[in-house]
Image (tube, grey):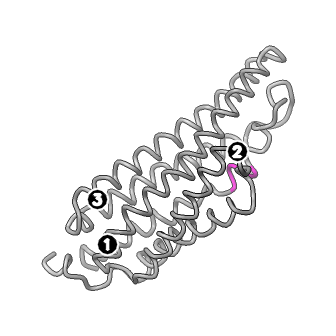
Amino acid sequence: MNSLRKTSLVAGVFYLLTFVSIPAPFILYSSVRASDFIVGSGPDTPVFVGAILEIIVALAGIGTAVALYPVVKRQGQARALGLVASRTLEAALITAGVVTLLSIVTLRQDGVGAAGLVVGQALVAQYAWMFHVSQSFIPILNAVLLGSLLYQSRLVPRALPVLGFIGAALLLAVWFAVLFGLIGSVSAPAGVAGLVIGAWEFSLGVYLTFWGFKPSPITAGM
């Protein structure tokens, strides 16, 4: 296995790891996002499991950009650096969101009771917007930056970055619609946009893991 194949394998595995936290916001965090969580009862374990999964996703996201950087910088160094920065910002927001939810758990364990309801609701709202930025807006930047690099270099079939461009356009429209209150963050348009951008990242992860880079002028001398 040559160094290029190792690079594509590592990047592909990291991309697939970014999907491990899918259950977190919809299942594992369902209790902590309830308005009465602080005064309620029940296990905190699902929140801790979700936090671990999201931290894995944050680190894996950075890993995708760092692993691909030595190759894609040959097509465009500024965009390659931008991808690393974008992924790092995404990871920071994901981690901040995790800390926000763990803070709610701490408040309940400390027995603040009804006095902490307003604070708990504020933290939930903060997490919702952090999630909206980190998982809806920043993936648009990632798709445009990496998609343009892969499309020009032909390191993967061009259908993959085109799918990323389509997903980015849909997600951008949905992001502004949610921002201005035209639709809810949980809605059919948001679901469709999320599925398309998710399909782009998952397909890229599968392709890099099992097939690797296609022959390209930018890898000829590597």
Residue 212: say if magenta: no
Name which residue lies at 31% across and 80% down: 154
Contact flag, marks 2 and 3 (Cβ < 8 Å):
no
Name which residue lies at 48% across and 58% down: 140
Q: Name the mark on residue 119.
A: none
Q: Position of residue 124 (x, y in %)?
A: 70, 33
Q: Secondary structure at mark 2?
A: loop
Amino acid carrying label 3: it is Ala
Amino acid carrying label 1: it is Lys
The mark tally for this picture is 3
Q: Position of residue 94 (x, y in %)?
A: 53, 43
Q: Secondary structure at mark 3?
A: helix
Q: Circle 2 is placed at which residue position?
A: 181
Q: Circle 1 is placed at which residue position?
A: 6
Mark in front: 2 vs 3? 2
Chain-order first, disc 2 or disc 1: 1
Chain-order first, disc 2 or disc 3: 3
Between residues 197 and 172, which one lies in front from this camera angle? 172
Tell me the magenta residue range. 23-27
C-alpha distance separating marks 1 and 3: 19 Å
Residue 95 in the figure: left or right of residue 27: left
From the viewer's perspective, is residue 33 above or below residue 152? Answer: above
Q: Circle 3 is placed at which residue position?
A: 80
